[in-house]
Amino acid sequence: MPTTADATHTLRIIAQDPAVRVKGEILTATVPVPAEKLWRGPWGHRVQVIDYDATSGVLYEPLTYATDGKGRLVDPFTHRPPATLIADPRFHQQNVYAIVMRTLSHFERVLGRRISWGFSGHQVKVSPHAFKDPNAFYSERDHGLFFGYFTGPKGRVFSCLSHDVVVHETTHALLDGLRERFTDPSSPDQAAFHEGFADVVAVLSVFELPGTIGRLLSLAPGGNGSGERVPRKFLSDEPFVRGLLGVAEELGAAIYGIPGRSLRASYATKPDPTAYSHKADWQEPHRRGELLVAAMLGAFVRVWQARLKPLGVGGLGGLDRDRVVEEGAAAAEHLLNIAIRGIDYTPPVHLTFGDYLSAILTADREIQPDDRKYEYRRLLRESFAAWGIQPGARPPDKKRSETAPLEPGLWCPLDPTRLTYDGVHHEAMRRDPDEVFRFLWQNRDALQLSAEAFTEVLSVRPCRRLAPDGAPLHETVVEARQLLELSSKEQQKLKGLRALGADDDDGYLTLTGGGTFIFDDFGGLKYHIHNAVDNIALQAQRIAHSLASPLRSVPVSRRFAELHRLRASDQHLLTPADRW
Ligand SMILES: [Zn+2]
């Protein structure tokens, strides 16, 4: 058993992708993973690796660990030559276990609480060699992550060895737990958000791995080998940055038949402020998700530049390589934390990319009010604007008790004098949905919640977050959903809904709305982040989009598999500029 002193143990994994090599060697990294006594699999308290191949009918021998004299787990792959790791299914088992656990623990650390998967049950089942097909997906119905393999031009390719792909699938399962309604048909943005967010987490996670940026720097075109200096303007060199930010290269190269073609090529295209609103080829969900990735990666490069600025003053020659690496990893980690933390500040239904931008800006302002040093929030706003994405926050609505935002693009805080806390217990408000419901009900006028709609508190989550300086921030995040069933007669009265008809056999149309409520440490409501059930313009858009969605006929349980399949086969959407 690990002692209490061993909060983590270390395991070796493949960093980024087996196709990425330095001097012919695969990049590996040794990473800390929360310590626990593992059963055969590996099988831990949150992750169970089951290595069954449904195509060949083979059940691979599960990995078991020995422990040393102090009860610490011994990684059998620590000293193995990297080339032998690719051929050993038991290493694949360790690779997925470690990356899934690491991703989960990152979310838990940033959000300041335990995080559930998007299904009932505590353990996600992970199949590293699930089937022979160039696909990988999260299945809510099967409580699992499934990784395929296939034969590429240079031999067998395992999606379970791509760091990006494993983090991407894990993120789907975590996001589904955090926002269960984001898989509902709603808007082009909501359909694309799961894909885009999973990619953002995947790409930024790679840079967080120990030593990875340094090794990738020497790989990128113009990266100056492994010299001690890095070209001063290296982040202005587009091919260099593209090489650095390439994602899932082995899979991409095999699927597209283009060496070096990454699976997701967001950074390959130049920012286009008309892309978000006007360009038809950005409307498909899997393509649209790349807008979000492009905006976040643009912010990453800007932040990295900002952090390197002090190094450039009065210096000659290149930049100190160690500092470049250090600042790049710090920028990636900080942005990844911002990206994850923002999820708690998104509305529970009908998300747009603009809503997500306001969410990350507001969540960051709460934990780090002083942003003057590197101006992360300004850089994020600019980077999103470069792709035409503006904050979703609207001007304060006094009827909803909103006051002016603290900075441009943030959600509006609430006026505390308009709310009543009579009869509610602060302690119970941190955990009890009925207590929270009482508060919402008695403040329904001040918050403009529709009293006619069926209201359900979906979750009550107390969190203890840590600011970058280590100061704790206590919050409780509540999600509530409102459903309004309208007969055709009732619809007639609402301008804008008339032509939409029913979505069930009894002639009723169900409108969905909801809000996220952020309470402070003392039980005071700070923010009500909402997409209201009685916002008719929003509802009309939502219904029109869901009727036209190609995924409408696909059962929810198959949606991720189908989305990935569409994405992989979607070569006709790629412009020549993408092919690099
Ligand atoms: Zn996906």
Image (cartoon, grey):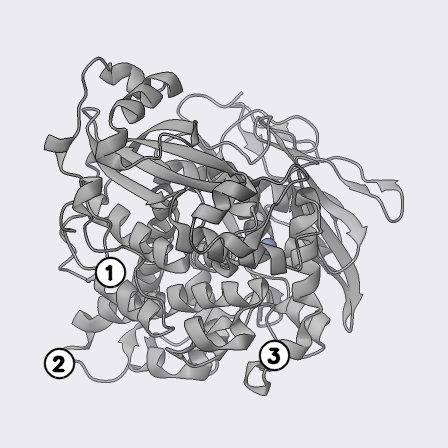
**Pointer 1: what residue?**
376
**Mark 1: which amino acid?**
Tyr
**Pointer 3: what residue?**
574
The answer to whether residue 356 is above or below residue 23 is above
The answer to whether residue 353 is above or below residue 153 is above
**Pointer 2: what residue?**
314
Task: Tell me where residue 198 appears, x and y as whole percent.
Answer: 51, 54
Q: Image point 16% across, 70% down: which residue? A: 310
Q: CA distance from mark 2 to mark 1?
A: 25 Å
**Mark 2: which amino acid?**
Gly
Using the rendered view, name the quadrant where residue 236 is placed: bottom left
State which mark lies toward you, 1 or 3: 3
Disc with the residue nearer the chain's start (3 vs 2): 2
Using the rendered view, name the quadrant where residue 549 is placed: bottom right
Left or right relative to 290: residue 330? left
Disc with the residue nearer the chain's start (2 vs 1): 2
Q: Image point 25% across, 55% down: which residue? A: 394
Q: Secondary structure at mark 3?
A: loop
State which mark lies toward you, 3 or 2: 3
User: Badge 3: few (under 14), some or many (20 or more) residues near its Cα, within 10 Å?
Assistant: few
Task: Tell me where residue 286 appears, x and y as whole percent.
Answer: 58, 63
Residue 310 is tagged as none
Q: Is residue 550 visible?
A: yes
The answer to whether residue 518 is above or below residue 231 is above
Quarter holding ligand 1:
bottom right
**Mark 3: which amino acid?**
Leu
